[in-house]
Image (cartoon, helix red, strand yellow):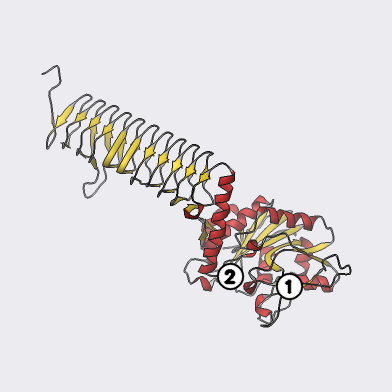
Amino acid sequence: MSATHTRIDSVGIVLAAGHGSRMRSKIPKPLHKAAGKELIGYSVDLLAECGMQTIVVVASPGNIDAISAALGDRVNYAVQPTPEGTAEAVSRGLQALDSVPGTVTVMAADTPLVRNKSMRMLIDEHCSRPGCRMSILTAPDAFGPDLGHIKRADASDSNTVGPISAIVEARDRHANSVGPAEVNTGVYCFDGPWLTQHINEVPKSPSGEYYLTALASMAANNGQEAVAAPFACADEAMGVNDRQQLSAVEAVLRDRVNCRWMLDGVTIVDPATTYIDAAVTIGPDTVIQPNTMLGGRTTVGADCEIGPNSVVRDSEIGDRCHIMASVIEGSLVHEDVGIGPYSHLRPQAVIESGVHLGNYVEVKNSRVGSGTAAGHFCYLGDADIGADVNIGAGTITCNYDGVDKHRTVVGDRAFIGSDTMLVAPVSVGPQGLTGAGSVVTKDVPPGGRVVGVPARLLPSNDEE
């Protein structure tokens, strides 16, 4: 894929060309998910939130197609043909631009814990110092083995922190060295013209790669200002190189998500057993009971109770709904609906207001009209159920003939007796009635009553 060119004033560059071999996966590392969102999505979204007018993702030939499929046209792309280090990757990113930007912000695709606040403070600090060539977001030394350490020169004043002199990469530190209590998070702001001028002067490191961090010592040695900005919290420095680190990052992200919703007026009874993906939204005064998972792009309204033991994924739940011990996926649930326990809404289920679905009810690709009740042991597949319908226990829509799926239509205020089999394609008219155990193979007229196997139409009251 060729690089996309655009004219911009400030850019963000996301480094996503690493092999990620320690993940031991056919999935590119930037596309592994934490809290339901691709790792690279956190970096791209953060840069966009912080005002980057253009974002360039630098990928490898092996992962560019998968990454571009995930991100689409939200970003521009550049390719790093061989893994020659972070400086070479940034050089590729700069080559994807038609003009030199005033400011360049760089971060990795595997650091999803960097906070918006920290990034904005770094950018503000950098932009407030006109002579600054490079600013590095740093954090306390809590996860040192995989992270570069900041070296500072001695301060002229004992009450101040000395200027940055270098960044020592983890693999290049001596085994017995003791680093300072400050690590590089891998997030940088650069003066764009200075970066463009010097990026290709970075020397090769002892490990054979061209490190972006070498620019810190290059600036210091030339009397130019490079700032190490200690704005980040320790957990923001956590990156992902293997599945253990992915799990650790996931735990931090999910705790942040839960805390955010509790501060916004959602009750989470047991945060330790509640899993809410990053893209989920929840209305105030909703209660999330233990052992509940809200995944994908789910929206939950206000004054709901979800759980315990419920899974809701990629669905929209209206206000004042109660969902207990049930699974809902790809569905739309209107307000004032009760579901469960042990019910299952499969994709394209639409449940209108005031519906009651009790225990062991399965709905698939169907609309259930307002006020309808299906209390026990039902399967409603490929059906259009009207309003105020009573669906008896054991009702099944026989929607599959072995070759094709067919639809069932039930009119408003119909009464479907227990153990009714509705053999599609078939319809039951408004206020129609089926007797218990009926096998309905022919359409029931409005107000009609059918019983038996196969179901036969009973005389109307007038005929009787």
Q: Residues within 10 Å of mark 2 (few under 14, many from 20)?
A: many
Task: Locate residue 157 relative to residue 13 in the image: left or right.
Answer: right
Taking depth in this image into account, of 130 and 62 the one nearest to the observer is: 130
Q: Position of residue 56 (x, y in %)?
A: 64, 59
Q: Quadrant of residue 15?
A: bottom right
Q: Identify the residue shown where x is 48% and y is 66%.
A: 27
Q: Position of residue 165 (x, y in %)?
A: 80, 72
Farthest-out residue, right: 156
Q: Residue furthest front?
A: 269
Q: Secondary structure at mark 1?
A: loop
Which image quarter: residue 340? Answer: top left
Q: Is residue 244 left or right of residue 459?
A: right
Q: Is residue 210 above or below residue 456?
A: below
Measuring 21% from the left and 50% from the top, which residue is drawn there? 402
Q: How many marks?
A: 2
Quadrant showing the N terminus = bottom right
Is 36 situated above or below 176?
above
The reply to whether residue 7 is visible in this rendering is: no
Question: For this rendering, which residue is in front, 22 or 254?
Answer: 254
Expressed as whole percent of the image width and height from the top left, the position of residue 221 reads: 83, 74
* Badge 2 or badge 1: first in the primary sequence: 2
| Residue nearest the viewer, comparing 224 with 153 | 153
Q: Which residue is depicted at the point 48% across and 53% down? A: 275
Mark 2, residue position = 18
Q: Which residue is mark 1?
A: 180
Amino acid type, callout 2 = Gly
> In 3D space, how far apart are the residues under numbered discs 2 and 1 (Cα atoms)?
27 Å
Which amino acid, mark 1?
Pro
Q: Is residue 403 left or right of residue 293?
A: left
Quarter in which the C terminus is drawn = top left
